[in-house]
Image: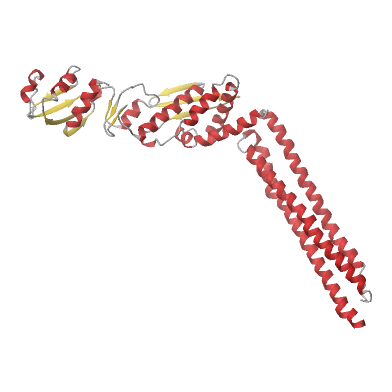
Amino acid sequence: MNMLLDCTIILIQKLQNKTYETGYICGNFILSLEEIPLILELNNYNLIEVLTTCNNIIDLENLHNYSEKELKFEIKTGDIPNYFETANDFVDGNKFECVLDDFYIADINYRENVSQNISIENYKQNLKLIAFLKTLSDNEKKKDNALELLFYKSGKGTDLKIEYNFDELFEFNTSSIESLKKQLQEVIAGEDKKQLFINELINFIGTSGKSYLVLVKKWDLLILNYDKSYSLFIAGFSFEKIKTSSNEHFQKLVDKISESIGKASTYIFGVPVGYILLLNGFDFTGLQIGKNFTLFILGTIFFILIWNVLFKNIDESIENIELEINDFFEKIDNVTVLTDIKNKLQSLKTTDLLKQRNKLRLVKILSAIIYLILIVITFFTFLNISVFYI
């Protein structure tokens, strides 16, 4: 522990009627023999001045003569490198790294290695992230109280400005950082993973802004994007192969839609023709009751088949295509080089598939109307003609 800091903390906590000036803290308390060694310790570093209540300077060699008397104290806190009056003062001086093994922050009553404070824990986690990002950056610029990290990859570059205040920090889980660091340090695939992550980081900063706080808030999203890219990578794809494969898969989806279009178009003409042939065989004189009833049964079977087999197959085919589009879209959602394909997929889903559903709906309506006509004709010939002849 730091003896100088110990003495400072004890004395400042005893002060009453505190006043603050730049680099100083003033106050008074009734002196006891216990505080004298602490005062003398600070005096060894010219960090304290003791006065009477009448503002007369006291010779510290005779300090014991003032025991149990009220005295005034001026402590030069500005000359104590590990004492901070406020948390923001501490962060301003240690924003990007902290080399202090021991320090004290007065306004939150925090002592390193002694106290517990969630905001300080968030601060330390924050430093781990900054240190990690610095190892990935190609260059860094420090200006005033801000740090700018520069990243380059495949002809693309961006910068990240690291600026924050103590009250802007929030809980941040660094376990993902430790895990990611181990991955990037692997002997076999570490360099490839590092380049993939830097590429995702550049894309993320480009789309989400250059704010460090935004990056921290959306860190989990960045890790998710990286995991998806790496999953594609370990499957044996480069970005060009991804493009080629994605185009091929996209074309297969288009072919499937075209096939379903062909089926729907065939049924638009085929279903009415089939019913017309049935109706053409009807005996409208009503004399051939058996023939009419047989044709009605066949028409009913035909109706059941096209609704429960043909239409259902087309409907399921459209649903499967939509599921494939959704699944494909999810896989390439964060792959920036496939933006054109993503737009085409969206068009397939919102335009082409909708047209297919409308065509299928039209065929269903037509088949229902024609079947209804078949029912009406059957009953008309039976009730109004056949019964008459009977």
| Front residue of this view, candidates 337 and 287 | 287
- In the rendered view of the protein, which quadrant contains the C terminus? bottom right
- In the rendered view of the protein, which quadrant contains the N terminus? top left
Q: Is 320 left or right of 98, judged from the image as shown?
A: right
Q: What is the x, y in percent for residue 204?
A: 54, 33
Instruction: Name which residue lies at 76% across and 40% down.
Output: 252
Instruction: Name which residue lies at 72% across and 33% down.
Output: 245
Q: Is 258 left or right of 103, judged from the image as shown?
A: right
Q: Hey, which residue is sitting farthest left in the picture?
A: 65
Instruction: Name which residue lies at 39% across and 29% down.
Output: 124
Number of numbered markers = 0
Q: What is the x, y in percent for residue 222?
A: 53, 34
Where is 99 relative to 241, above or below? above
Quadrant of the rendered image containing residue 25? top left
Quadrant of the rendered image containing residue 8? top left
Q: Is 77 left or right of 322, judged from the image as shown?
A: left
| Front residue of this view, candidates 204 and 34 | 34
Q: What is the x, y in percent for residue 6?
A: 23, 24
| Front residue of this view, candidates 369 and 158 | 369
Q: What is the x, y in percent for residue 282?
A: 91, 70
**Scheme of colours in the image:** secondary structure
